[in-house]
Image (cartoon, rainbow, N blue to C red):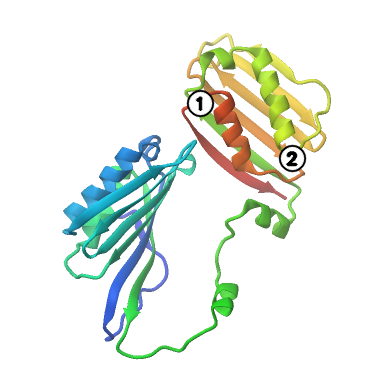
């Protein structure tokens, strides 16, 4: 039995036709905080799932992106297992393609669920590929793509579509350089660099104040008014973590903000949440 937190989305088309292969796309949400940061861990997870499910492993190739993210493929005699991981969202997208009946897909899915420490797994599609026993009606590619009900990938396109009042990005940076986050001048320089990057006009001086009698919360807090709203943040000495919020009625690219902060403060990894405020 598949785990109780694994869900199917859509319908699996069953018929008497013969197909060349079967393809599953699986969404792993709420994964372990650091599991998806490590290329070797992700590779081992897919190799383990392929082996336990009965697949014949041929080779594997995985790549770690900067500042974070992992993509990889395990080539099997029956086809492939692929993955792309977004550590900032604790999410991994997996694709299993098989042209044989010997692979136990349930074992593979649950194996990766355990390896990724995922709390919520969704099987978003289950498709037959290469149905060859009878012809199917050909449709124009442009018509199919235009009529598909999908969510946008680009935040800018979604912003232009919904025309919200503003964009809020919350970025948490972990294991930052302790010397940088304890230096008010460095924090101020980061704010100036950030405003230049996202083309925001500063309004007034950057306010940086040291707070916290309790060592658990001790550290600098920062606010900077901008012409289009506000940048704020807290720099926690106890954990060397940074909690940034950027709210603006002018669009900016959220990922650029996160990657600048990661680079400037020499963080180990980051998490990011984005909201369009109406």
| Label 1 close to label 2 by CB (< 8 Å) | no
Which element is circle 1 on?
loop
Relative to 147, is 277 above or below? above
Q: Which residue is mark 2?
A: 248
Q: Earlier in the sequence, mark 1 or mark 2?
A: 2
**Figure quadrant of residue 134:** bottom left
Nearer to us of marks 1 and 2 is 1
Quarter holding the N terminus is bottom left
Relative to 232, is 58 above or below? below
**Figure quadrant of residue 214:** top right
Q: Residue at x 33, y 82 (%)?
A: 131
**Few, some or many residues within 10 Å of mark 2 (<14, 14–19, 20+):** many
In this picture, residue 66 sits left or right of residue 186:
left
**Figure quadrant of residue 82:** bottom left
Q: Residue at x 24, y 61 (%)?
A: 105
Cα–Cα gap, marks 1 and 2 = 24 Å
Relative to 158, is 248 above or below? above
Which element is circle 2 on?
strand
Counting from the top left corner in percent of width and height, residue 84 is at 41, 50
Residue 51 showing in the rendered view:
yes
Counting from the top left corner in percent of width and height, residue 255 is at 59, 41
Q: Residue at x 20, y 55 (%)?
A: 57
In this picture, residue 102 sits left or right of residue 152:
left
In this picture, residue 187 sits left or right of residue 41:
right
Report how many numbered discs are placed on residues in the image: 2
Counting from the top left corner in percent of width and height, residue 199 is at 76, 37
Q: Residue at x 80, y 38 (%)?
A: 228
Residue 1 showing in the rendered view:
no
Q: Which residue is mark 1?
A: 267
Q: Residue furthest top?
A: 213
């Amino acid at each position: 039995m598949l785990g109780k937190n694994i869900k199917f989305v859509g319908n699996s088309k069953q018929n008497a036709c013969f197909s060349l292969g079967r393809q599953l796309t699986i969404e792993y949400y709420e994964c372990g905080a650091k599991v998806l940061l490590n290329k070797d861990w992700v590779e081992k997870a897919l190799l383990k799932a392929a082996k336990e499910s009965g697949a014949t492993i041929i080779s594997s190739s995985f790549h770690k992106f900067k500042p974070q993210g992992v993509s990889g493929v395990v080539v099997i005699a029956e086809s492939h297992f692929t993955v792309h991981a977004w550590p900032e969202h604790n999410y991994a997208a997996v694709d299993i393609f098989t042209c044989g009946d010997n692979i136990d897909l349930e074992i593979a899915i649950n194996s990766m669920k355990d390896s990724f420490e995922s709390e919520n797994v969704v099987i978003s599609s289950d498709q037959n590929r290469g149905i060859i026993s009878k012809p199917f009606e050909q449709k124009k590619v442009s018509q199919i793509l235009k009529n598909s009900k999908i969510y946008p990938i680009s935040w800018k396109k979604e912003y232009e579509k919904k025309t919200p009042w503003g964009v809020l990005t919350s970025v948490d940076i972990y294991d930052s350089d302790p010397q940088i986050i304890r230096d008010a001048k460095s924090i101020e320089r980061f704010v100036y660099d950030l405003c230049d990057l996202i083309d925001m006009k500063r309004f007034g001086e950057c306010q940086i104040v040291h707070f916290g009698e309790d060592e658990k919360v001790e550290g600098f807090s920062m606010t900077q008014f901008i012409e289009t709203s506000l940048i704020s943040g807290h720099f926690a000495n106890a954990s060397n973590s940074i909690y940034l919020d950027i709210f603006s009625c002018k669009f900016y690219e959220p990922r650029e903000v996160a990657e600048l902060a990661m680079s400037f403060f020499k963080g180990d990894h980051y998490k990011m949440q984005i909201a369009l405020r109406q």
